[in-house]
Amino acid sequence: MPESPTATPAYRLRSVCVDYPTPAGPVSGARDITLDIPSTGMTVLAGPSGSGKSTLLRVLGLFERPDRGTVELDGTDLARLSHRRRRALRRGRISLVFQNPVDNLLPQLSVAGNLRAAAESAGRHRYPDDELGDVLEDLGLDGTGEWSVTALSGGQQQRLAFGCALARRTPVILADEPTSQLDDTSATRVLDVLRRLADRDLTVVVTSHDGRLIDLATRVVRLRDGALHAVADEAEAEKGHDTV
Ligand SMILES: Nc1ncnc2c1ncn2[C@@H]1O[C@H](COP(=O)(O)OP(=O)(O)OP(=O)(O)O)[C@@H](O)[C@H]1O
């Protein structure tokens, strides 16, 4: 369910700028971004190549510190945190799914082993078998628990990557172009998983060019040249209105 505009956002970004040093001078990855990300539903960061989607996702994932501006996660100003506190916050609150399915998994472990390792990586030392079974069933991967992840198709691996995010039980799931390396059928099944995630009490933020994924969004954030171009919530998007 999309939340009311008055609900507390998960992320609050104010005048965020990221500059990349290059031999030819600084290149702007994010220009003066002021944006709230709702605590539930799915926010899609959309825009052409080089518009700053990955930069913004890295800021949200605490992998990139803005050069200027502030970012709050659940009311905590991230600039005030020590390196250790940032790492602990990332570990306990954020799961990240990369574009390339194999980058999300440990190839030496089985499907179940990957889910258990993911749970452990977020500090969950007990991951009950029935929960593991439920996650596999939810992902359409039941019966594959003992398989090597290398025996899964790219689409199955990507669904498992979202399963690992669920096993970590973090309130925030970030995904970078999760369907871009998949064929149509596999992408459709990943979209089904994302649709169900977006209905849970989770903050889901995804970068994508995929129109089908953008159609699932409760908030679409459009970027151009590192700057915010438009923000549309589900209700406005259906009416064709954009609001910044
Ligand atoms: N490490 C870096 N060093 C220098 N410039 C960078 C670096 N990372 C990104 N940029 C520049 O920052 C801008 C935004 O890049 P970013 O990767 O965030 O865009 P994007 O929308 O995710 O692109 P794509 O869809 O191609 O992945 C671009 O001009 C890019 O060239």
Image (cartoon, rainbow, N blue to C red):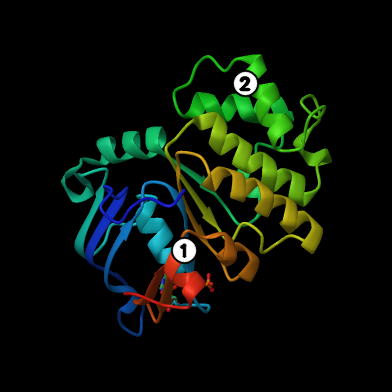
Q: Position of residue 167 (x, y in %)?
A: 56, 30
- Up the image or down, 1 lies above or below 151; here it is below
* Vertical comparison of 27 with 235: above or below: below
Q: Amino acid at mark 2?
A: Glu
Q: Looking at the picture, tell me which residue is in the foreground, 65 or 49.
A: 49
Left or right of 62? Residue 14 is left
Q: Residue 90 vs residue 197: left or right?
A: left
User: Where is residue 213 drawn, in percent x and y?
Assistant: 60, 62
Q: Residue 36's image quarter? A: bottom left
* Residue 131: image tag: 2
Asked whether the viewer can see residue 139, the reply is: yes
Instruction: Tell me the kind of residue under disc 1.
Output: Glu
Quarter placement of the C terminus: bottom left
Rendered-image quarter of ligand 1: bottom left
Picture layout, residue 68 above or below residue 188: below
Q: Secondary structure at mark 2?
A: helix
Q: Nearer the viewer, residue 103 or 76?
A: 76
For label 1, the SS is: helix
Relative depth, front residue between 189 and 235: 235
Instruction: Select label 1 or label 2 by which is in front.
Output: 1
> What is the distance, in whole Å, between disc 1 and disc 2 at their CAs?
32 Å
Residue 21 appears anywhere in the view = no
Task: Indicate which disc, 1 or 2, sits on the residue closer to the N terminus.
Answer: 2
Horizontal side of residue 111 vs 94, given as left or right:
right
Mark 1 packing: few (<14 Cα in 10 Å), some, or many (20+)?
some
At label 2, counting other C-alpha atoms closer than 10 Å, the crowd grade (few under 14, some 14-19, many 20 or more) is: few
Q: Which residue is mark 1?
A: 234
The residue positioned 51% from the left and 70% from the top of the image is 238
